[in-house]
Image: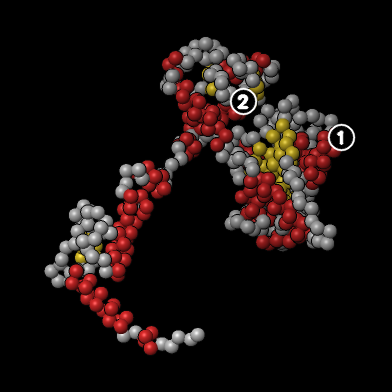
Amino acid sequence: MEPGPIPAFYCCYLLRSKGGRSFYIGSTLNPRRRLAQHNGHAQGGAFRTGRQHGHHRPWDMTCVVNGFPSNIAALQFEWAWQNFHTTKKIPDDQRLDMPQEAAKRPKAESPLSTAEQQGKKRKRIRRPQLTLRNSLSNLHLLLRVPSFNRWPLAVRFLCRDVHKSWLDYSKRDTGELRDGFRVFCDFGELPEPTVDLKLSTDAAAERKVSLTMAILEKIDVTYSALKPHIAKSIALAAEMQYQKCSVCERVLDPESPVFLVCPSEQCSAVSHMACLAKKWLKDQPSPGFLLPVSGTCSQCRREHQWVDLVKESSIRSRGGKHLAKLMKEPRVRKSKATGRSASSEDAHPEERACGSPEDLQVYLEDSLTDVNLLTIDPDDDLLPAGWQELVDDDDNMSVTSTESGIPRRNGSPEQSSKQRQKLAAVIEDSEWDSAEVLD
């Protein structure tokens, strides 16, 4: 199986029930869809947030941690966040919640495991209850440990009170996050209810969840933001035989797609991945690390995140269907109105009035029908130019255009005279002559 590109978006999140007493930690690549699944509005979702625990609904997403280099990395962080009392990512001297052995069950209630059958003692570790305090405190700790502090992670808070608790804990805690760590706040504003409206707990929770869904809708979970960067890299790759590395100044290999391009629009700096990593590590001394977190371009002098450059390179070289879908040009369909307007100048006057040739045919049929009803002589000039009357063999009800060859219904002269006589007879036999006129 070939490795895929770095995911466009993958995050871990913290859910809170409507009562504020239950919490849930999970991971997803689409937080808005996942929140709808937890609340039963879409198919899927975890068992703990399902119908069996429906009294906790609606769940609200309080914060999101994103920026993981792969989905495996996000799952590792999720497991460490859920099992903060046993994870090996947290050193024992820094662990906030120590593991505790669970109470032993009677032997009659639990069958013996394989280890117990072999005479080995198995310790059952009790998972501590998840609260807002230990969720935020262990999140702060995980972002500082060596396993995760070099990852390009960012935290986005969606609830004001949760962000306030985060700030309070950050002031009390002695540890600090690395320089450049990004924390975003996106709370939104709920419309104030009227004075007479008293919202219940469920109604207030639903209003807050609807606001959260609107905020999550604005988060881009696709590669669309990288499209200008990728288009620029593809254009430079076409001239790769003339491109030189901006660090070592050697000509880049045109056969190798692994190169990094500066995201700035006006900058054309291209470099080897290893050369740029060494330069950025040298500019910001980080002993013991292989990859930098960020750095400054040598040409445009702008600071960029390492993950942004690598993500563009990964989708360009291993994107496959993702790259094809992203770079596919949208189809521009030519509307009927545009097609008609382009040829309207060269059209016949009747055709310009009616539009398409089909409309012209209906227009001419109606015109000739009206001519028959009025019993106009065929030799008059009121008929359209170029039309001639032809007498059929049987029904005498068809006329053919000498210009277009389109059959048209019409009457013969004999039939027209019969219609005039019949019309006159009807008028003479009318009862209006014997009607009395009232003064």
Secondary structure beneath label 2: helix
Q: Please state which of residues 253 and 246 is positioned toward the viewer in this rendering.
A: 246
- Asked which quadrant contains residue 186, the reply is top right
Task: Identify which residue is drawn at 72% across, 32% down.
Answer: 182
Question: Which residue is tagged 2?
Answer: 306
Secondary structure beneath label 1: helix
Residue 434, compared with residue 405, is above or below; it is: below
Query: Mark 2 or mark 1: which is in front?
Result: 2
What amino acid type should be assigned to the residue bearing mark 1? Arg
Task: Identify which residue is drawn at 39% across, 45% down.
Answer: 341
Count residues near mark 1 (Cα–Cα under 10 Å), then give few for <14, some for 14-19, many for 20+.
Answer: few
Task: Identify which residue is drawn at 19% across, 59% down.
Answer: 388
Q: Nearer the N terminus, badge 2 or badge 1?
A: 1
- Any part of residue 272 in sight: no
Residue that sits furthest to the front in the current view: 439
Residue 173, compared with residue 205, is above or below; it is: above
Rendered location of residue 54, percent (x, y):
70, 61
Residue that sits furthest to the right in the current view: 172
What amino acid type should be assigned to the residue bearing mark 2? Trp
